[in-house]
Image (spheres, grey):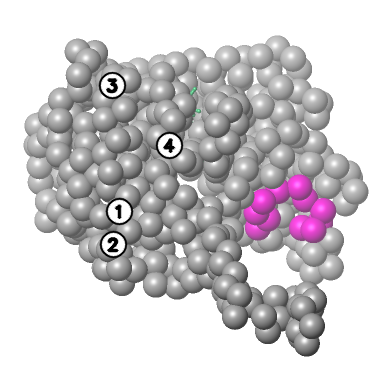
């Protein structure tokens, strides 16, 4: 099979299999796993095997953690300016590799090529570049002691010289999911590395290929051995890594259920945790909104990456008097989507990640319909090979219905109506999640009132999925713990040391 990934690049599928021979990255070298166990990586657009990947053993996890611990000193000796250069160098290597990396991601994850190029590859490049500058700006403070010096003749604050420094938390276990593998890996690595931490990274067992390629680029960029280690395997290996006594902090993105289990494990030894978890985000359309823009946004958000985005606005809440207009337009867009392999330049909706995920999404649709939801569009013919799900829009009036409460992680939109602003806010907040919300209205006062009443880490007004590293990204309620992005995101990887010197 020949793949044309851009006008200038043509490769054979065999070249994309390179990643399967790499093994594990431990202490700057590719090593074979000590277990014989492997996992088959499948192309979700065909259902066919793509590669065979090593499953690390617990002993391999231990070796990776030990390498990361040993590398702490060498990484500490790398100056902040050199760290900036290394991260920037890595961003350049990734950008130069965009054709290869993006096709590899499409083959492994199933998303469309445009999305892989823009979100996965350029998103990773921009994230690295944003964080690279923080390496030289992470300073503590000098502090004037606030209380009076009680000694005879003492005055306020002059008896002590007090300051704080920001120290790396140590070795980070970075555990990431399969929906945007490269960006997820980079969003952990970049702040951890600028803060002076070393890392053991575990990609999802379904999507290790771009992470393994990233390992090659990390070596090429010149990071000291052991600063970044990569182990592949399933949830058991994730659990072994998280529970390892040599890990100081866990940076996790994935489901809320796994997040809870990680928090429980980490709690036993008081490891720090950052958890970016699931969502059931609302998109709220008021009757004064630009209805065309709102409908396009609703469709785009839920069908992007086949609905496998944590911040996808999977609940559409529409004011009653514009319901028909908005729904008709969303269904029209859904009906026109071209479904197919992400490598097909016409395709707008790719497959979901696995047969298991397809079965899960379809069972949510079935159970919603059985519980009284009306299917407005869905069930269209999809390619028979691969794990495709037709775009689906369901009208659901029961706010307690499973489809309104639980994360489906597929191209399935649940629509409900409201009459008043208060009702819209109540419905929007009526889930255990609190990741994001998108709000559509031309009324500035209403935009402020509703935005400030939504229980979510991010609220977009008259826009959707505008993500930028300058902004803190955080899940409220069951959507997470801790912050990614902005200075706050880097501070998750440092701990202050307060020093007080008597003068
Ligand atoms: P998952 O929780 O099943 O797996 C995520 C990662 O954790 C994988 O690498 C997996 O191998 C590992 N893992 C599984 N069990 C583990 C355990 N007990 N201990 C340690 N590691 C373990 O999630 P998924 O199905 O791969 O990803 C989809 C989920 O990710 C969705 O819920 C989605 O909302 C969420 N997500 C959240 C964000 C965010 O920023 N909030 C971003 C993307 C995805």
Q: Nearer the viewer, residue 190 or 152?
A: 152
Q: Residues within 10 Å of mark 3 (few under 14, many from 20)?
A: few
- State the separation of the CA atoms marked 1 and 4: 16 Å
Question: Is ligand 1 closer than 8 angstroms to the Cβ of mark 3?
Answer: no
Please check the rendered image and state whether residue 458 is part of the magenta-colored stretch, yes or no: yes
Q: Earlier in the sequence, mark 3 or mark 4?
A: 3
Mark 3 vs mark 2, CA separation in Å: 28 Å
Residue at x 25%, y 58% (from the top left corner): 90
**Residue displayed at 35% across by 38% down:** 201
**Disc 1, disc 2: CB below 8 Å?**
yes
The answer to which of marks 1 and 4 sits earlier in the sequence is 1
**Residue picked out by circle 4:** 247
**Which tag is nearer the camera, tag 1 or tag 3?**
1
Query: Would you say the residues marked 1 and 3 are in contact, meaning their CB atoms lie under 8 Å apart?
Result: no
Instruction: Provide residue 435's location: percent of width, then percent of height.
Output: 64, 44
Instruction: Judge whether residue 326 is colored magenta.
Output: no
Question: Is residue 81 positioned above or below 51 on the image?
Answer: below
Measured in 3D between alpha carbons, the distance from the residue under mark 1 to the one under mark 3, in whole angstroms, is 23 Å
Q: Nearer the viewer, residue 332 or 90?
A: 90
Where is mark 1, residue-wise?
73
Whether 233 is drawn above or below 151: the answer is above
Q: Position of residue 420 (x, y in %)?
A: 90, 48
Which of 442 and 439 lies nearest the eye of the viewer? 439
Is disc 1 placed on a helix, strand or loop?
Answer: helix
The answer to the question of whether label 4 and label 2 lie on touching residues, with beta carbons closer than 8 A, is: no
Q: Residue furthest front?
A: 152
Q: Is residue 208 above or below residue 196?
A: above
Residue drawn 44% across the image and 30% down it: 245
Marks 1/2: CA–CA distance: 6 Å
Mark 2 lies on residue:
77
């Amino acid at each position: 099979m020949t793949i044309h990934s851009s006008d200038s690049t043509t490769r054979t599928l065999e070249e994309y299999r390179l990643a399967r021979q790499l093994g594990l990255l431990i202490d700057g070298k590719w090593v074979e796993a000590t277990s014989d166990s492997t996992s088959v990586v499948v192309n979700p657009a065909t259902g066919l095997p793509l590669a065979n990947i090593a499953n690390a053993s617990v002993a391999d996890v231990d070796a990776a953690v030990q390498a990361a611990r040993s590398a702490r000193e060498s990484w500490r000796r790398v100056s902040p300016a050199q760290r900036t250069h290394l991260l920037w160098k890595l961003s350049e290597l990734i950008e130069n590799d965009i054709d290869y990396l993006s096709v590899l991601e499409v083959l492994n994850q199933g998303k469309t090529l445009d999305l892989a190029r823009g979100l996965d590859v350029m998103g990773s490049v921009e994230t690295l570049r944003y964080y690279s500058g923080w390496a030289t700006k992470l300073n503590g403070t000098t502090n004037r002691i606030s209380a009076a010096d009680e000694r005879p003749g003492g005055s306020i604050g002059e008896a002590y010289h007090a300051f704080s420094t920001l120290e790396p938390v140590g070795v980070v276990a970075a555990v990431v999911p399969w929906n945007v593998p490269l960006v997820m890996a980079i969003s952990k690595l970049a702040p951890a590395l600028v803060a002076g931490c070393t890392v053991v990274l575990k990609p999802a067992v379904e999507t290790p290929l771009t992470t393994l390629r990233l390992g090659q680029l990390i070596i090429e960029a010149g990071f000291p051995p052991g600063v970044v280690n990569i182990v592949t395997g399933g949830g058991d290996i994730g659990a072994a890594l998280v529970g390892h006594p040599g890990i100081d902090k866990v940076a996790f993105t994935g489901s809320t259920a796994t997040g809870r289990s990680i928090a429980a494990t980490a709690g036993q030894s008081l490891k720090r945790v950052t958890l970016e978890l699931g969502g059931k985000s609302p998109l709220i359309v008021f009757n004064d909104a630009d209805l065309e823009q709102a409908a396009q946004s609703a469709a785009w958000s839920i069908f992007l990456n086949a609905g496998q985005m944590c911040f996808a606005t999977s609940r559409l809440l529409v004011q009653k008097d514009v319901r028909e207009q908005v729904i008709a337009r969303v269904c029209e867009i859904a009906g026109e989507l071209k479904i197919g392999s992400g490598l097909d330049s016409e395709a707008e909706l790719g497959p979901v990640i696995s047969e298991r995920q397809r079965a899960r999404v379809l069972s949510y649709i079935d159970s919603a319909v059985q519980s009284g939801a009306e299917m407005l569009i869905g069930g269209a013919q999809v390619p028979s090979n691969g794990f495709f799900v037709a775009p689906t829009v369901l009208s659901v009036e029961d706010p307690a219905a499973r489809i309104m409460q639980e994360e489906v992680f597929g191209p399935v939109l649940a629509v409900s109506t409201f009459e008043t602003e208060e009702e819209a806010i109540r419905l929007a907040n009526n889930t255990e999640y609190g990741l994001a919300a998108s709000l559509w209205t031309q009324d500035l006062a209403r935009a402020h009132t509703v935005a400030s009443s939504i229980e979510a880490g991010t609220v977009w007004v008259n826009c959707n999925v505008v993500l930028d590293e300058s902004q803190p990204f955080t899940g409220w309620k069951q959507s997470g713990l801790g912050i990614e992005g902005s200075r706050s995101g880097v501070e998750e990887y440092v701990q202050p040391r307060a020093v007080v010197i008597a003068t």
